[in-house]
Amino acid sequence: MLDEPSPRMPPVPPETLASLVKTRRVLITVGAGGVGKTTTAAALGIAAAKRGRRVLVMTIDPARRLAESLGITNMSTEAVDIDPRRFADAGYPLEGSLTAMMLDTKRTFDDLVIKHSSTKENAQRLLGNKLYQYVSTSLAGTQEYMAMEKLVAVKSDPRWDLIILDTPPTANALDFLDAPERLMEALDSATMKWFVEAFQSSGKLSLNLLARSAAMVLRGIGKITGGGFLEAMAEYAERARAGGGPLVLCGDMNVARSDKDVYPRDCKPDVIGQRPDERALFERILATGLVDVGRALDPDTETTFTWWPPWRNMRQKNQGWRIDYVLASQTPGLEAKECKVLTDVGTSDHAPVVATFA
């Protein structure tokens, strides 16, 4: 006898916005710029306050459009209560309350440092570190990480029933959730810790590591950064080369140096990694006396790539970009003999670049 078919599970009806604002503790609006995230965050906040909830709406929007959406003139990094008479006069009285706050990324980062530093002196030393100042203001992922940090801080605050976070623009909505993890992976790396040590609180570069070693290797940082980090790296290279010692920089710089380093060949000057300003910064790094080892040993190649988009068999077709480099100073005793891209090593969408020096 055949078993009776099991009854189908009844479909779960989707939650409506009305039910979300009444039942949830945290709501996050995400998406690309210009799609209405801030307006949506404000509307959700008003709808929840209308239903009697005590609502905090936070934004990292640098244009401060949330203030305009809520009809207030000034946003503050402190919680600002919206006057309920504003809504009552418009025929939309609130049974609860509505509060708005502008998230100051740098201040939140500084507060985190002060909170977890063992002494005030250690905190001040880190706050004055040149690389920390860049990381806390400009490094890719910082805004998202600090937004999540602030969200955790206010989530347990009994003053509010609902927290609504208006996030910075992202091309992919899930990028907001992934960015903090990418940032922490990079900042936890041994290389980044070494790089931090190279900058002193005075703002002057310490060349102690140059004295201890014939070469210094910097890898795996460019992947999460933009042009600002290239500029910081250029400044670092200039100061390091002024010390006269040998220098090797290698890793994912996230810039295709020329049109030879991209396939298809059509130049897209608005695409990150091909922009003229990024390429100019890359050439500035080389102008400190460094050589692009791969290009120097094979100046005419147009088919050597180190990264391929992870779709449509681009790696197998060898349609990618050359964005991983070994850069070396022209120093006696530091002569490059070979530079190979290990395309058969498929542990990621990048391939390792291996250089051999005399």
Image (tube, rainbow, N blue to C red):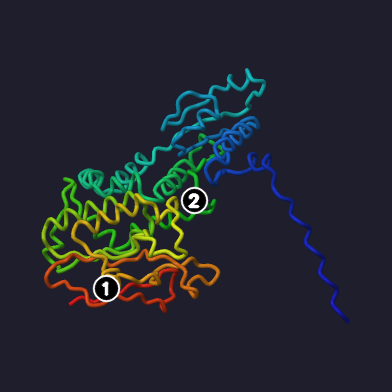
In the rendered view, does 160 fall on the left or right side of 197? right
Q: Secondary structure at mark 2?
A: helix
Residue at image point 58% right, 34% down: 45
Q: Percent x, y for residue 91?
A: 67, 20
Disc 1 packing (10 Å; few <14; some 14–19; many ≥20): some
Q: Secondary structure at mark 1?
A: helix
Q: Percent x, y for residue 341?
A: 35, 75
Amino acid identity at mark 2: Phe
Residue 312 is drawn in which quadrant?
bottom right
Residue at image point 30% right, 73% down: 298
Q: Percent x, y for residue 295?
A: 29, 68
In the rendered view, does 140 fall on the left or right side of 203? right
Seen from the viewer's position, the closer of residues 104 and 22 is: 104
Residue at image point 26% right, 77% down: 338
Quarter of the image for the C terminus: give it.
bottom left
Q: Nearer the viewer, mark 2 or mark 1?
A: 1
Residue 331, compared with residue 277, is above or below; it is below
Seen from the viewer's position, the closer of residues 210 and 312 is: 312
Give the CA distance from mark 2 to mark 1: 41 Å
Residue that numbered label 1 is attached to? 297
Quarter of the image for the N terminus: give it.
bottom right
Q: Percent x, y for residue 75?
A: 45, 29
Amino acid identity at mark 1: Leu
Residue that numbered label 2 is attached to? 176
Seen from the viewer's position, the closer of residues 17 and 137 is: 137
Residue 297 is drawn in which quadrant?
bottom left
Residue 69, compared with residue 233, is above or below; it is above
